[in-house]
Image (spheres, grey):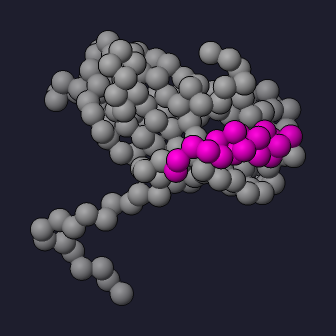
Amino acid sequence: MNDQDLSAIYETEVLPAWVDYNGHMNVAYYVLVFDGATDVFMDRIGLGAERRKRDGNTLFTVEGHITYKREVHSGDRLVCDLSLLGYDEKRLRFISRMYQKEEGYLAATMEWLHLHVDLKSRRVTPIPEDVSQKLSGMLEAQADEPWPEEAGLAITRPVGRAAEPKQ
């Protein structure tokens, strides 16, 4: 994999300890895998560990949404890619897709919203210009890609009996 390729960014294996009583990877480990892909992404755009130490800034997750498409099992190789959905002065929105490597099927997606934060003040702060330039280049490189169908989803399916929202 080329360091300039910001799409296919992370690979790992489903460990036996990650498998639950249903015989597939437990929900907590999906987030762990997606978080590993996010760490690689942060390094590649210039917001990794060195930048955190030097400038005291990082990304904080403020929202995430997972869709589970197909099961993965102990020993399966997983590959994650990432598409930038948008950014502004202080926020990044992206989606990661997890594939079962051997069979190539989409196992899950996770859409993220992150804020750029100053660790000293614990306040949101502008994204550095060099990072914004990398993000701009990434959006341009993805310009012809279709919008991921899982992006922007929320739990909207009605269930038989539901609580009434309080006003």
State which quadrant residue 161 falls in. bottom left
Q: Residue at x 58, y 25 (%)?
A: 9
Q: Residue furthest bottom?
A: 167
Q: Does residue 64 show up?
A: no
Q: Is residue 41 above or below residue 159?
A: above
Please tell me how many numbered marks the rendered image carries. Answer: 0
Looking at the rendered image, the quarter that the N terminus falls into is top right
Q: Residue at x 23, y 26 (%)?
A: 24
Q: Nearer the viewer, residue 2 or 28?
A: 2
Q: Position of residue 93 (x, y in %)?
A: 60, 51
Query: Residue 119's x, y, as percent?
Result: 75, 45
Q: Residue furthest front?
A: 144
Q: Is residue 159 left or right of residue 79?
A: left
Q: Main secondary structure of the magenta part?
A: helix
Residue segment shown in magenta:
130-147
Residue 119 as seen in the image, left or right of residue 67 = right
Residue 155, magenta (yes or no) = no
Is 112 situated left or right of 6 in this image?
left
Image location (x, y in percent) of residue 140: 72, 44
Residue 9 appears in view: yes
For the C terminus, the image quarter is bottom left
